[in-house]
Amino acid sequence: MSSLSVISEPTLPAQKPPVDPKTLAHRELLGGDFWRRIPSYASVSEAEFLDHHWQAKHSITNARKLLDSIKGLAPDSFFQDAEAGFARAPMSVRVSPYLLSLIDWAEPYSDPLRIQFIPVGTKLLPDHPKLGLDSLGEQADAPVAGLTHRYVDKALFLPLNTCPVYCRFCTRSYAVGIDTEEVEKVQLKVNEERWKKAYRYIESRPELEDIVISGGDAYNLRAEQIESIGMTLLDMPNIRRMRFATKGPAVMPQKILTDHAWLDALTRVVERGRKMHKEVVLHTHFNHPAEVTEITRSAMDVLFERGIVVRNQSVLQRRVNDAPEVMTLLLRRLALVNVHPYYVYVHDLVQGVEDLRTTLHTAIALEKHVRGATAGFNTPTFVVDAPGGGGKRDAHSFEHYDRDTGVSVFTSPAVKADRYFFYFDPIDELPAEGQARWANPAEHPRMLDEALDKARRLERA
């Protein structure tokens, strides 16, 4: 008798368990009249709060007024601490009512938005010994005032030096805002003659194809200025791409909803660029998921409907977004509102904000955690903007990194092939041995020589 073979049923893969509700937290955006938690805004209507004119008019530019507006929401000791912080800050004060309303004043010391915009004296740390005011060397690569030409095909155009809100950690604290007790600013005010010199230089360099319009902040350009800059650059045959850079959507999304002239001007530049087969996009700057609200979503929906691509560049900051769960939530929340995460910058060596910097290792570890949390096109690259003008380097692309001394060495073959660039972890985050070496100025050149020697030996290996 012939035996019959038994065909077994295929084994089905195990079903995934129900999703943890925490996985969907990125969809939970703050809405309602949250601003009424602030006594000064308790009677402000929704129409007023959504008006960009009202937001700009009531933005606080004086430390004393800022503290007065939140009296009773935090202990007096916090206000005294903040006064001491403002006295030592390299940046001017400017905070929008919207931003002030998002801060959790019951826990001001731990709130990630307060940390970014309102310094407190007790948290400030000494600047790193290798820090410089223009740490990225932008002025050294500026053939014309307010125009940095570092990369072969790209230039950075700074048409103005003001912003809707001033960030403590601004890389351009050497120029942005008014003079402070700590810093006398380089002057980059709106100046048509200076702009014309920049245009002439851009047009004279056939290799330039990509222009970033920043500042300051493109939000603070008038509608006619947005259109004038955009159309002038589009008319240049060599220019293929441009990006208007603004912190605005994170700190005053109301402008997109109610400044119709500004939005229409940007839209006309984008649409003309599209017809010319040239790319015009908006680059913005969200650092924490609490910055993305229902108002944000409404503003981003308007940009999306008009076909305006929005990309995001974050700055990695201690106690703000240096935890995997926070960074993952930020990326997924940005994707929800059609903003593409593009870069996360390892914090530049900026004066007065050593308490915000993280180690290079933190960035590398974070990138591993977020990779795969969402689609690849919504996953940013973590970069070091190499001090001294080396440009953006992948955080993990160092030639050498000593976690004891915090010294990392990068090269930048396409930008400045014959140079090495150093980045430095914050000293208070180093092990005791590394901190002791930095406490001795005689050790500083030795640490750099050691790191450079090891980098060169690894390159030759």
Image (cartoon, rainbow, N blue to C red):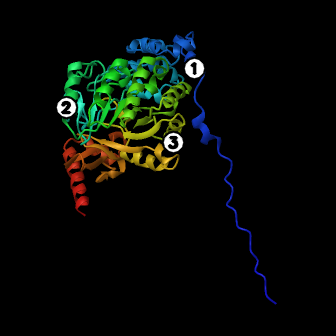
In the image, residue 306 above or below residue 326: above
The quarter of the image holding the C terminus is bottom left
Three-letter amino acid code at disc 1?
A: Phe
Q: Amino acid at mark 2?
A: Tyr
Is residue 230 at all visible to an observer of this figure?
yes
Query: How far is mark 3 from mark 2, CA to CA?
Result: 41 Å
Q: Measured from the top left, where is residue 305 in percent x and y? A: 51, 30
Residue 337 horizontal/vertical position (percent): 53, 33
Determine contact: label 3, label 2, CB under 8 Å.
no
What distance separates the C-alpha of mark 1 from that of mark 2? 48 Å
Q: Earlier in the sequence, mark 1 or mark 3?
A: 1
In this figure, which residue is indicated by the disc labeled 3? 328
Q: Position of residue 402 (x, y in %)?
A: 31, 51
Q: Nearer the viewer, mark 1 or mark 2?
A: 2
Instruction: Identify the residue at horizontal 29%, vertical 22% (top origin).
Output: 161
Q: Residues within 10 Å of mark 1 (few under 14, many from 20)?
A: few
Q: Secondary structure at mark 3?
A: helix
State the SS at label 2: helix
Residue at screen point 40% across, 45% down: 381
Query: Is there a contact, CB below 8 Å, between mark 1 and mark 3?
Result: no
Q: Amino acid at mark 3?
A: Thr
Mark 1 residue element: helix
**In which quarter of the view is residue 142 placed?**
top left
Residue 280 in sight here: no
**Where does label 2 land, which residue?**
201
Residue visible at 57% across and 17% down in the picture: 37
196 and 391: which is toward the camera: 196
x and y, in percent, of residue 390 in the image: 25, 43
Furthest toward the right, the residue is 1
Residue 34: numbered disc: 1
